[in-house]
Amino acid sequence: MKAMVLNKISSLEENPTPLEMVDMPGPVPGDKEILVRVSACGVCHTELDEIEGRAAPPRFPVILGHQVVGRVDKPGGKSERFQAGERVGIGWIYSACGECPLCLQGNENLCEKFKATGRDANGGYAEYMVVPEDFAHRIPEVFSDSEAAPLLCAGAIGYRSLRLTGIEDGQNLGITGFGASAHLVLKMARHRYPRSKVFVFARSKRERNFAKELGAVWAGDTEEESPEKLDCIIDTTPVWKPVVEALKNLQSGGRLVINAIRKEDVDKEYLVKLDYPRHLWLEKEIKSVANVARRDVSEFLELAARIPIKPEVQEFKLEDANEALIELKERKIRGAKVLRI
């Protein structure tokens, strides 16, 4: 099979083609696994973190990609959930132990044995991949393959973030950064909480205009103060500045949810500017989001199909994965980038 493979950590500035197209043997499904012929795979900011070492894979070579859509090519031995030909999706959660207290509570995203697709196991930047059948999801017919792919990570993690805010209809929601996940959160929030107003903070004028096109009542730069205090805010950025700036816009007793796998050190000194009376006092909260559970993926796919939520997508060929990653690095973003295999 053809696959775009990452062989080592490198800086995209120094090496703009970190992924190499190779021919390699196709994977073989084991017991309770399925072999998936990949048709589309979303490109995520987390892949930049993997390539540049901020969230490095445990071994190389590795095939990236965790927003995977395809057809079941062959069920493995003892596999019963899917038949050959069924369309399935695979998200960031590749597997968990299923036995620890966290898994039994439905918090498998926090399991010590959590494995991530495209990091701890080969992902979807390839013609085929295998996955445990219990961690694959049926894709609603309303979506094309390319539309479904971003829903599996950007959509699912956005769904979990929105749920963790505790927002009630009529409360004000803020979003910092406006990439793939954020634009889906805005669409979701407008449907589920029709009386709520959504305020967006983004560095790019293009992103701010896009947010207003999708229904944000206001969009400003990261450092601006919102015209109204916000009951909850979702931060979708990889840096610290938007977190500190967002806190000043938070209502007393409000909650900031950080939807990020990590924060860069480039602006860590910005935390020195955190002013307790202005930013955190009056029972404001900060809560992180760690990975996603299967529940987040399945519930969001059902919700997205009902609304329906269809992401803006820009398609690339598999062999152009490096180009898509560079554009993501350079913040040439409108919606989500998807590889067509």
Image (cartoon, helix red, strand yellow):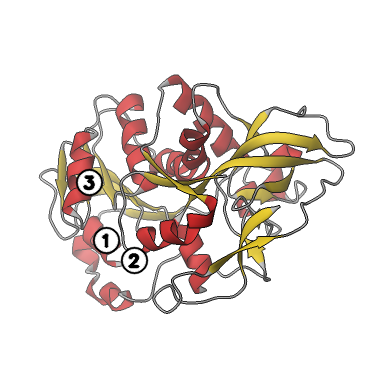
Q: Is residue 145 left or right of residue 62?
A: left
Q: Which residue lies furthest to the left in this view?
A: 227
User: Height in image: 151 above or below 334?
Assistant: above
Mark 1 in CB contact with mark 2 (< 8 angstroms): yes
Measured from the top left, where is residue 274 in percent x and y?
25, 70
Secondary element at tag 2: loop
Q: Earlier in the sequence, mark 1 or mark 3?
A: 3
Q: Can you see residue 54?
A: no
User: Height in image: 302 above or below 121?
Assistant: above
Measured from the top left, where is residue 324 in percent x and y?
42, 56
The amino acid sitting under disc 3 is: Val
Q: Which of marks 3 and 2 is nearer the N terminus?
A: 3
Kindly report the distance in space between the C-alpha atoms of the residues bearing marks 1 and 2: 7 Å
Kindly report the distance in space between the C-alpha atoms of the residues bearing marks 3 and 2: 16 Å
Secondary element at tag 3: strand
Measured from the top left, where is residue 101 in percent x and y?
71, 49
Q: Can you see residue 230?
A: yes
| Residue where numbered disc 3 is placed | 200
Measured from the top left, where is residue 31 in percent x and y?
87, 43
| Residue where numbered disc 1 is placed | 242
The amino acid sitting under disc 1 is: Pro
| Residue where numbered disc 2 is placed | 239
Residue displayed at 32% across by 63% down: 330
Residue displayed at 49% across by 22% down: 142
